[in-house]
Amino acid sequence: MAGYFEAINLGKTYKTPGGDAVIVQGFDLEMKEGEFVCIIGHSGCGKSTVLSMVAGLNEITEGSVILGGREIDGAGPDRGVVFQAPCLLPWMTARENVMLGVEQVFYHATKEERAQIGEYYLAAVGLSGAMDKRPAELSGGMRQRVGLARAFALSPKMLLLDEPFGMLDKLTKFELQGVLLDLWNRERLTAMMITHDVDEAIYLADRVVMMTNGPAASVGDVLTIDLERPRDRKAIMTTDRYRQYREHLVGFLEKCELERPVHEEAA
Ligand SMILES: Nc1ncnc2c1ncn2[C@@H]1O[C@H](COP(=O)(O)OP(=O)(O)O)[C@@H](O)[C@H]1O
Ligand SMILES: [Mg+2]
């Protein structure tokens, strides 16, 4: 049976002044519905390139992406995307930012129903008291909470997250990982998240996909995280299994580091 999500021989070649740059090549990945996959890999290997192609924001130059039985063709609200910076419209409140997408997706619902959807997700990310604030009045962590609420509120087929907590301090990052996991536990959306934080990947994912170094990056290894949910960060971190997962992932990244061409070291 085919997967709910499939990247088949996915590839990206950027046209550059110096000629064609093959960044991703032969990237294959199948995901079950409701699965949470994290992608790790060295900076610049092509993680964002893969995610942005899946999001439909970056043209696919080779292969294809299937989601829910259909080949994706361009961007759409069936994929909720969260970037490192949440890209909120600064003149709109948290609520209005979330409602933009809700109104587009749930146009057939009543105004009241739509408002309820927006409020439900804003409350779920802990923003009950800040719904009517503008981004400038919110901390970085709170803005990213709005970003999560906005993505989940679309009830998308798939959630795509590109280092969503990469700019947050450690404590805020832990909080937001908890918020994400709570919401995900409720809805079990199919999720693909890029991170370069090995602990974050183990805490969140069902499987961790390790990307090889570019150029022509692809899937180098896949690790299944067999830890019961809901997960308690402290409890899982003290287990042998956690340590083994961690060693596996760090080992992969270190091996990639050693295989990097010498000329890149200066960069
Ligand atoms: N529009 C573009 N044109 C040319 N090269 C690009 C473009 N976007 C990204 N790249 C190159 O593709 C490689 C992978 O980038 P990216 O997918 O952002 O990596 P990652 O997210 O893993 O850090 C990098 O070497 C980057 O310079
Ligand atoms: Mg990136």
Image: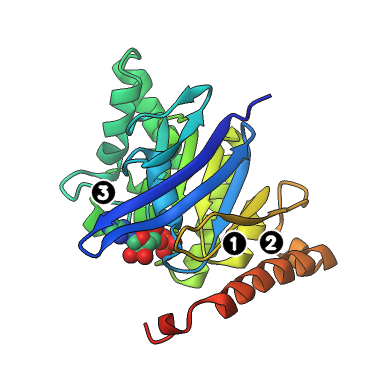
Q: Residue at x 51, y 66 (%)?
A: 213
Residue bearing mark 2? 233
Q: Residue at x 33, y 34 (%)?
A: 75
Q: Residue 185 location, x and y as percent? A: 63, 40
Q: Is residue 128 visible?
A: no
Task: Tell me which amino acid carries mark 1.
Answer: Glu
Mark 1 vs mark 2, CA separation in Å: 10 Å
Residue that sits furthest to the front in the current view: 19
Q: Is residue 221 visible?
A: yes
Dots 3, 2 in contact, CB < 8 A: no
- Reply above or below: 203 against 230: below
Q: Residue at x 47, y 64 (%)?
A: 214
User: Is label 3 in a helix, a strand or a loop?
Assistant: loop
Mark 3 vs mark 2, CA separation in Å: 30 Å
Residue bearing mark 1? 200
Mark 1 vs mark 3, CA separation in Å: 24 Å
Task: Tell me which amino acid carries mark 3.
Answer: Leu
Describe residue 98's horizontal placement relative to residue 31 as left or right. Answer: left
- Locate the C terminus and report the quarter of the image it occupies: bottom left
User: Is label 1 in a helix, a strand or a loop?
Assistant: helix
Q: Nearer the viewer, residue 134 or 104?
A: 104
Q: Nearer the viewer, residue 136 or 200?
A: 200
Other residues around mark 3 within 10 Å, as few (<14) / some (14–19) / many (≥20): many
Task: Tell me which amino acid carries mark 2.
Answer: Arg
Residue that sits furthest to the right in the current view: 240
Other residues around mark 2 within 10 Å, as few (<14) / some (14–19) / many (≥20): some
Residue bearing mark 3? 88
Q: How many marks?
A: 3
